Image (cartoon, rainbow, N blue to C red):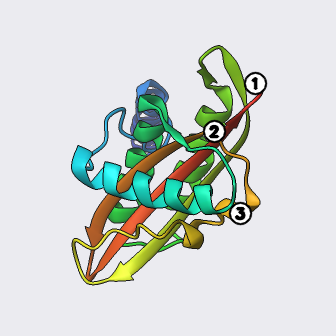
Amino acid sequence: MKCIKKLVALTLAAVLALTMLTACGGTSAPSAPLHETSKEVRTQVLNGLNKTRAELGKPDLKENAEVDLLAERYMAALKKCGANWNDTDMKNTRSELVEEARALKIDGAEVTITMAQVRYTEGTDKPLVDGGYFGLDKTEADYVGIAVDNIGSKTYTIAWLIKTAS
């Protein structure tokens, strides 16, 4: 009986020691997007957004590669969870991307406001190009990152808006 207790204790100690050697942490966001929006579609959406801004008397939004990557990574997370906003991984990814956006310096200026706007249209390959749906009348953004992809029977368009301290 003593031998069995010692064997169980030794086995338990070995298991505990091995668990200490394993890596901890959850899943991390991909450093590169799983999908990339074509330049043509990105330009189409940007032109629609800037048309709305011109009607509001606001300057054009400028594209930025770093902000585009944030939008693409957000789209990848959205697609992975099937556009389920309540998915824990989706919420965590969004929080991580917002922190990354706040840490950016664009043209030497710090980011003061970051906001991701997500809209969808019914049907595939139909990006939303009407800037009125993105709350552009409520933001003073300077830069935008754009991602477009199909999820199920809908086309999702993300406009990640950034305002810098200029």
Q: Residue at x 40, y 70 (%)?
A: 128
Q: In this view, does 125 lie above or below 63?
A: below
* Residue 142, numbered circle: 2
Does residue 132 appear left or right of residue 27 in this picture? right
- Judged from the image, the secondary structure of the residue bearing numbered disc 3 is helix
Give how far apart the Cα atoms at labels 2 and 1 are. Answer: 9 Å
From this view, report whether residue 156 is shown above or below residue 10.
Answer: below
**Label annotation for residue 137:** 3
**CB within 8 Å, label 2 to label 3:** no
Residue under label 1: 166
The residue lying furthest to the top in this view is: 108
Residue at disc 1, secondary structure? loop
Viewer-closest of 127 and 32: 127
Query: How many residues crowd mark 1 within 10 Å: few (<14), some (14–19), many (20+)?
Result: few
- Of the numbered discs 1 and 3, the one sitting upstream in the chain is 3
Query: Could you tell me if the residues under marks 2 and 1 are in contact, i.e. CB atoms within 8 Å?
Result: yes
Indicate the quadrant where residue 151 lies: bottom left
Does residue 35 appear in this view?
no
Residue 41 location, x and y as percent?
27, 55
Which of pointers 2 and 3 lies earlier in the amino acid sequence? 3
Q: Could you tell me which residue is drawn at 22 percent across and 71 percent down?
A: 125
Q: Rate crowding at label 2 as few (under 14), some (14 to 19) or many (20 or more) other CA atoms within 10 Å.
A: many
Amino acid type, label 2: Asp
Residue type, label 1: Ser
Amino acid type for the residue under numbered disc 3: Asp
Identify the element where label 2 is drawn: loop
Q: Are marks 1 and 3 in contact (CB under 8 Å)?
A: no
- Residue 48, image x, y percentages: 44, 61
Query: Residue visible at 35% across and 53% down?
Result: 76
Q: Which mark is residue 28?
A: none
